[in-house]
Amino acid sequence: MLKAQHYSAAAASKGEFTLPAEFDGIVNEAVLHQAIRALRNNQRQGNAATKTRAEVSGGSRKPWRQKGTGRARQGTNRSPIWTGGGVVFGPQPRDYHTKLPRKVRQSARRSAFSARAREGAVCVIEAFDFEQPKTKQMAELLGKLELTGKKVLILTAGVRHEVIRSANNIPRVSVMRYADASALDVLWADSLLIEEAAFGEHSLRGVSQKSVSGRAKRAVKAAEDPAASKPEKQEKKSATEKADAKPKDGDDA
């Protein structure tokens, strides 16, 4: 299992923290790429628009007569080759929304968290001891954790308004619930600061213990009991033995 640095509310080191089963250490880059593209597509407004020659104003009169001028014939001054004319094959408002299967989103989240954990970019804090919003207190906490100047994603167990407001004025620091973080949010940050209670109260969105990959389950099982990981081979009975084992007609029960 992956581990992370563990700190108290005062940023004192408490050793290592064993991360839950969602951090299985498996990074599926193909799924991550698919999820990040979908999440970024869903952020697009899709309102870019241009006017075709039918939509621009003017152009109803022929600029000059057809023959006798020595110039090329023109039927309208709103042709795409004229300045102020229509645009050919320009962008039109459209919906960029991309839908991903639920299991793909879950796998991308697990991969993103595992990638940051493998890099040693995950810190677990015992609790955020903020009685009221205080930017100075948050800045001092990040300084003790050597996170000043980095892109930091703070993940809390619930909605902590005092923590959110304490980090609002600190550049490149974002705060959200652990259950709300997407793969894009996790990969945006250089470091993750996670509240310890978040692991107990919230699992990854829509992810239960049943969804943890089979590879991770087998790895944990093999570590606990190496002998159990090797199933015993059953001897195959020959066709003759199977026939002898069957009761014959007339035999007493």
Image (cartoon, rainbow, N blue to C red):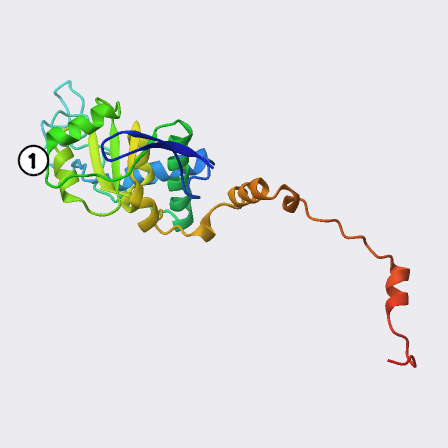
Q: Mark 1 falls on what kind of element? A: loop
For mark 1, what is the residue? 58
Q: Residue 244 appears at what percent x and percent y?
A: 90, 66
Mark 1 closeness class: few <14, some 14–19, many ≥20 residues within 10 Å:
few
Q: Which residue lies at the image location 53% right of the left edge and 42% below the top edge?
A: 220
Nearer to the camera, 240 or 219: 219
- The answer to whether residue 74 shows anywhere in this view is no
The relative height of residue 116 versus residue 92 in the rendered view (above or below) is above
Q: Residue 237 appears at what percent x and percent y?
A: 84, 57
Q: In which image quadrant can residue 199 be found?
A: top left
Question: Which amino acid, mark 1?
Answer: Gly
Q: In which image quadrant can residue 132 be found?
A: top left
Nearer to the camera, 158 or 137: 137
- The answer to whether residue 35 shows anywhere in this view is yes
Count of numbered circles in the view: 1
Q: Which residue lies at the image location 30% right of the left edge and 46% below the top edge?
A: 179
Nearer to the camera, 107 or 226: 226
The relative height of residue 229 versus residue 170 in the rendered view (above or below) is below
Q: Which residue lies at the image location 19% right of the left edge and 25% below the top edge?
A: 81
- Residue sitting at the far top: 70
Q: In which image quadrant can residue 109 be found?
A: top left
